Image (cartoon, rainbow, N blue to C red):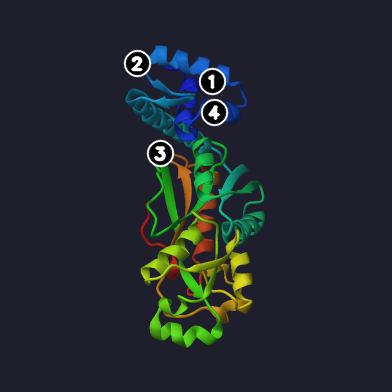
Amino acid sequence: MLDLRRMMLLADLADLGSVTAVAEHRNITSSAVSQQLRVLEEEAGAVLFRRDGRTLGLTRSGQVLAEHVRRVLIAVDEAMSAVAETRDRVAGQVAIATFNMGIPTLAVPLMQRLSTEEPNLRVQVQQDTSAAALRLLRQGEVDIAITCQYDFLGPDSTGGLTTVPLLFEPLVLLAPTHSHLRIRNQGLSALADGFWVTGPQNYGLGIAAIHACESAGFTPQIKHRLIGAQNICELAATEIASAIVPRLSVPANLENLIVEGIELGGRAIGAVVRAGRQRDPNVAVILRTLQAIAGQALPGGAEKRLEVAS
């Protein structure tokens, strides 16, 4: 019989990539993790791990077992959700991890509504990147991850997870007002000689600016790189640089900088839970409330929401 706690360490190793990271996550020593994994290998009767220098990786057998472990953990989640359904009221604490703009757009309105509608349900929020939020969700550190996925990037791996679509947020172009007519006539290439402000390299908004400009036939002259779409908006408002940002990050007083009619794609925002947890009454209430909030988030209201559930 395989030990569930040892199987959880295997799943951690598959997600985190090193024994040291697993040890830090579980608050135990690296030697204890290694010892438990060796015992698991004996229990499984197969070679699960291979060493590459100081790194411990998974063999094909290890990968197969890790995938089955995730299914076992889903079954555990389903069992806990079934037990939770027997409660006669919504109460307790739910932990949420969310990307930057998910806080003012979704998390804050969520907590405001729940304080009135479900006063016995407490929400704990932490900010992180979408990838990190998914990692925390897999590790059981949070119950819900609010994530964004840009449509020009490949999808994140969501095996063992379920995504509840919330809304599709378009990307918009902010540019000096005197250049708007020229941009509408010539497209994005009208800004080939100008400066740009965007996010860090290899992150969503930074990639979005490069992708859009290269699609228009030029490489943008990036003068400023900032963390946070709202900060990018504020700097673009000085009208010294153009920017591509999510629509919800643009404050009302800067909407005059948006160049209408420029198609730049967008990002899908969703609430991700471990498969089997949707039935938990606490989680279900939060998912329904997030969907209601998302339906009112963008100008135009509920018709902007994603219609197809994953």
Work out which quarter of the rendered image holds the N terminus and state it.
top left
Q: Secondary structure at mark 4?
A: helix
Q: Secondary structure at mark 3?
A: loop
Q: Are marks 4 and 3 in contact (CB under 8 Å)?
A: no
**Relative vertical location of residue 219 with respect to residue 182 in this rendering, above or below:** above
Label 4 and label 3: CA atoms lie apart by: 19 Å
Q: Residue at x 57, y 37 (%)?
A: 141
Q: Which residue is mark 1?
A: 33
Q: Which residue is mark 4?
A: 22
Please name whichever residue, 261 or 273, is drawn nearer the observer in this view of the structure.
261
**Relative vertical location of residue 288 with respect to residue 229 in this rendering, above or below:** above
User: Which amino acid, mark 3?
Assistant: Gly
- List x then y, in percent, for residue 52: 43, 25
Q: Which residue is mark 2?
A: 46
Please name whichever residue, 172 or 187, is drawn nearer the observer in this view of the structure.
187
User: Which amino acid, mark 2?
Assistant: Ala
Label 4 and label 1: CA atoms lie apart by: 7 Å
Q: Which residue is mark 3?
A: 160
Q: Secondary structure at mark 1?
A: helix
* Within-10-Å neighbours for mark 2: few <14, some 14–19, many 20+: few
Please name whichever residue, 116 or 168, is drawn nearer the observer in this view of the structure.
168
Tag 2 or tag 3, which sits nearer the N-term? 2
